[in-house]
Image (spheres, grey):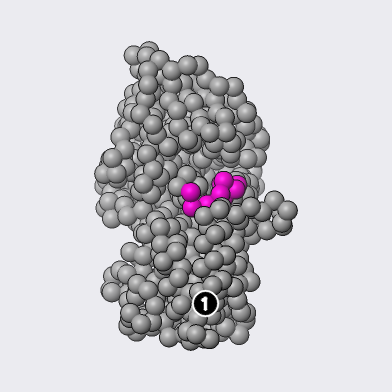
Amino acid sequence: MVTPAGRPSAPTSPIQVLVVGAGPVGLTAAHELARRGLRVRLVDAAPGPARTSRAVATHPRTLETYDQMGIVDDVLPLGRRNQAFTMYAGGRRRVRLEADYATMPTRYPYTLVIEQTETEAALRSAVARLGVRVEWGVRLADLGQDADAVRARLVHADGREEECTASWLVGCDGGHSTVRKRLGLELLGESSETWMLADAPVDTEVEPDSIYWTHTGGQALMMVPYARAGHWRLLDTVPAAGGDGPGRIEEQFSAKLSAGLGHRVRVGEASWTSVFTFQQRMVERMQDGRVLVAGDAAHVHSPASGQGMNTGIQEAYNLAWKLAMVEQGHAGRQLLETYSEERVPLGAALLGSTRTATTLVQLKNALAGVVLPLALRVVDAVRPLRRAVQRKVLGGMSGLRIGYGASSLTTADCDEYRADAGFLPRSARGAVPVPGPGARVTAARVHGPDDQVVRAFRAELRDPRWTLLLAAGGHGPGDVPVGVAVTAAAQYGEWLSVRTVGGDGPDGPAPLADPDRRLRTALGLRPGAWILVRPDGYVAARGTLLTRPALRRALAPLVTPVPLADEARREPCPAVRAATTHDLEEH
């Protein structure tokens, strides 16, 4: 716990969440908190928006998140859709890996190459529509907290100081995070490599329809095409010392790329360059009382697979809905413990995967120039191997295989969730794979044209609440599924959206269009079956028949949000406990 900050110099309006840092992560957090009705203040020490871009890759899972946020249509026109990764070695093209999302259904089967400045501009506009403006030139100098609030000492660009009091503080202030340092959270890990980035026009024979990786015999480089014609993001894994004179950087890139690609390449004047030594470090926890961290404030790592911004955005979304539920009294404080529970292991896994990606990207081994062309030739010639590599690469980068099956918010054994209900993957029984507990609900195969079914499903996922989907037509003692759904909608409607898939009024509350049963088939829902979806689009629980005990078990981790193994500590939120024990028992 940190010591309290100094006294305020001037009173401030009461706010619920102070977000420190207005990059993509802070903007996402502010957007999702404000979208749920919280009063948010967003500050950043920089004098204004960034003019250069670190992150340029937005992966499919992040695009799905943008869709839920309601901003994906603002972002997509600003970038280039990339669906290939092409590898050169010894001056020749060796293999082209095409996007293969056959085992990872998604509406966005590509990586969007978009400059971080464009991403931030779109997010700022979205945040502004919700009434939140970025306060530039406002630096966090100190912070303190007690059981009721956080007090932050802020310093304005003109030197004026103020104390801001908020219920919560979220630190999204980057790798040198003041929030993390004030909390005493240590970044554990190691230093790594020095690389160079550059944005420049490039005259080359390769088409801008792929990300390119090329090995020159002693090192590797990468090229990523921007939406702006002729402009590329370049990465050099072995930048030359003393090569920062006028024109030297462009000359070095031109020579190295020419050798790697096997034809003359000319790199024009770079609009931005950066030589940096990246690290592989992370914190062991992401919360201290009423203060939480996300993004680079919690972990820093290699840019090899373009995961930093994407991971931070996922964290901000994960945190925002939980923090909003706690602040609005819909869940107990323990719900926030699941933020670290779910995200710290993913951060650790990310460090491992980026360490591997870093090794593969730079390939400094002296034998690489000899062995690599042969290995890539085999990958290109053996189709099953090429497809396996494609899916392995995409699976690691896309974010589509991230799940929360081990989370205490996931209930895997609700009702009669069993093999004969058709919930097994295709390889086990030949049934259509459907999203199980802990998986993305968007793994369901319902990503066709924007017809009535797809539009209705996408709109439902944009609702900031939890979602309970009941398949129409189920019957039980006293029409149990419909009765339980009606009761849940009436009691929990403030934080739970209850929809009847494919039904009309008598079949249950709020019918969701599904005239050809496509959505129910994709979700694996037979009549009376149900699926409970978290606000971030992950399945919390599902079952074959919606009954009071089944729903009660599914909501238990939320009602009593403590890891299930810690039975002695369970204390439900009073309002939800009363509703559950009365309405779901007595209906």
Q: Is residue 103 above or below residue 26?
A: below
Q: Residue furthest top?
A: 159
Location of residue 300 (image quadrant):
top right
Taking the image as shown, residue 162 lies to the left or right of residue 544, namely left
Q: Position of residue 207 (x, y in %)?
A: 33, 54
| Label 1 sits on residue | 546
Q: Amino acid at mark 1?
A: Leu
Q: Which residues are magenta?
A: 329-337
Q: Nearer the viewer, residue 25 or 257?
A: 25
Whether residue 333 is in magenta: the answer is yes
Residue at left offset 41%, top offset 66%: 490
Q: Position of residue 209 (x, y in %)?
A: 35, 56
Q: Residues within 10 Å of mark 1 (few under 14, many from 20)?
A: many
Residue at left offset 46%, top offset 57%: 536
The quarter in which the N terminus is drawn is: top right
Q: How many marks?
A: 1
Element class at badge 1: loop
Taking the image as shown, residue 416 lies to the left or right of residue 95, namely right
Q: Nearer the viewer, residue 32 or 136?
A: 32
Q: Position of residue 41 (x, y in %)?
A: 38, 33
